[in-house]
Image (spheres, grey):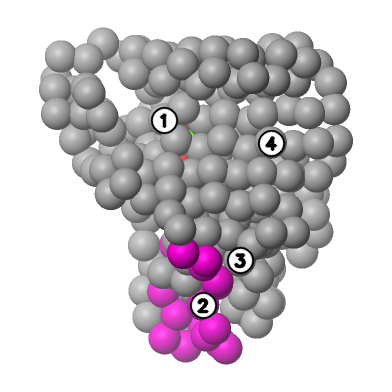
């Protein structure tokens, strides 16, 4: 937040095509890692900018600044996303939107909250009238044609599609019932681990594009309440090529 109103002075570099990292990403990540290491010295860490630290059954998955492109343009849609995984289970999640002071939290088996209020996914029963979040493929464009087919079908079937530019908040909004569903291709674990637990604990469903559990591995995902999720999968399936089915 300290730098958010003077982004013009910020140094940033390109990690790849349309993929930027700034001093803010790195400083936020270092602060989070320092805090976690001091409290949980034996736990491992997987962080977007500095990679893996240590190994073990407990892994903290960290995106210190999700929505860097928004942040660097002064667009107020970005967040911090942190999840704790134990073996194959997501145990705890936090997604924090510092602009709105909205803190989304979840612990496995204990529900999900927005600040101190319990949240649930929306109750909509079909795609008619639904508001759906997504992310456009802007870095890796191998699936752009498949994606545009999906986008057209979703636009023609629902009340609208939104691309806010911060996947962790997109998922948190499904958990909070602000959007009815979400899909995106090619996300990384730090973009979605916390948001996935928020959705599950808010009574929602999140899967890969084949309806399986491998969304953290494939980076491709669909989320919503049970009915919306099913309808989204049915609508997206005709556009899947062999790579996206895997
Ligand atoms: C990005 C954002 C964006 C999503 C990208 C992510 P970053 O994260 O979550 O919404 O579409 O795929 O990489 O790079 O700003 O941390
Ligand atoms: Ca991210
Ligand atoms: Ca990031």
Closest to the camera, between mark 3 and mark 1, is 3
Look at the numbered disc 1 and say if its residue's Cβ is closer than 8 Å to ligand 3.
yes
Q: Which residue is drawn at 57% across and 29% down?
A: 62
Marks 3/2: CA distance?
9 Å
Look at the numbered disc 2 and say if its residue's Cβ is closer than 8 Å to ligand 1.
no
Number of residues whose C-alpha sits closer than 10 Å to that of mark 4, classed few (under 14), some (14–19) or many (20 or more): many
Number of residues whose C-alpha sits closer than 10 Å to that of mark 2, classed few (under 14), some (14–19) or many (20 or more): many
Marks 3/1: CA distance?
24 Å
Disc 4: which residue: 84
Disc 2: which residue: 122
Q: Earlier in the sequence, mark 3 or mark 1?
A: 1
Tell me the quadrant of the picture where the N terminus can be found.
Answer: top left
Relative to 20, is 90 above or below? Answer: below
Visible in this render: residue 17?
no
Marks 1/2: CA distance?
27 Å
Relative to 195, is 34 above or below? Answer: above
**Residue 206 relative to residue 14: left or right:** right
Where residue 44 sits: x, y (%)? 73, 19
Confirm whether the magenta stretch covers residue 59.
Answer: no
Disc 3: which residue: 202
Q: Magenta stretch? A: 117-141
Where residue 149 sits: x, y (%)? 51, 64
Where residue 153 sits: x, y (%)? 49, 74
Could you tell me what secondary structure mostly forms the magenta stretch? Answer: loop
Relative to 188, is 242 above or below? Answer: below
Confirm whether the magenta stretch covers residue 130.
Answer: yes
Q: In which quarter of the image is residue 208?
A: bottom right
Q: Quadrant of residue 129?
A: bottom left
Disc 1: which residue: 65
Q: Residue at x 41, y 30 (%)?
A: 65
């Amino acid at each position: 937040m300290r730098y958010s109103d003077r982004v013009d002075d910020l140094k940033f570099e390109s990690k790849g095509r349309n993929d930027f990292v700034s001093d803010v990403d790195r400083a936020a990540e270092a602060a989070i890692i320092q805090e976690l290491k001091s409290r949980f010295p034996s736990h491992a860490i997987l962080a977007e900018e500095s990679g893996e630290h240590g190994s073990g059954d407990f892994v903290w998955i960290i995106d210190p600044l999700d929505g860097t492109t928004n942040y660097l343009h002064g667009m107020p849609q970005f967040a911090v996303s942190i999840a704790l995984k134990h073996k194959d289970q997501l145990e705890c999640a936090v997604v924090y939107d510092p602009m709105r002071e909205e803190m989304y939290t979840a612990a496995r088996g204990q529900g999900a909250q927005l600040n101190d209020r319990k949240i649930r996914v929306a109750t909509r029963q079909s795609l008619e009238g639904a508001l759906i979040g997504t992310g456009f493929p802007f870095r890796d464009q191998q699936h752009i044609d498949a994606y545009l087919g999906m986008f057209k079908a979703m636009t023609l079937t629902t009340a609208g599609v939104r691309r806010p530019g911060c996947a962790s908040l997109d998922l948190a909004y499904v958990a909070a019932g602000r959007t009815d569903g979400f899909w995106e291709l090619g996300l990384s674990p730090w973009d979605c681990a916390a948001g996935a637990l928020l959705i599950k604990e808010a009574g929602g469903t999140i899967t890969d594009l084949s309806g399986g559990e491998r969304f953290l591995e494939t980076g491709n995902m669909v989320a919503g309440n049970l009915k919306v999720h099913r309808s989204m999968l049915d609508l997206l399936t005709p556009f899947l090529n062999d790579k996206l089915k895997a």
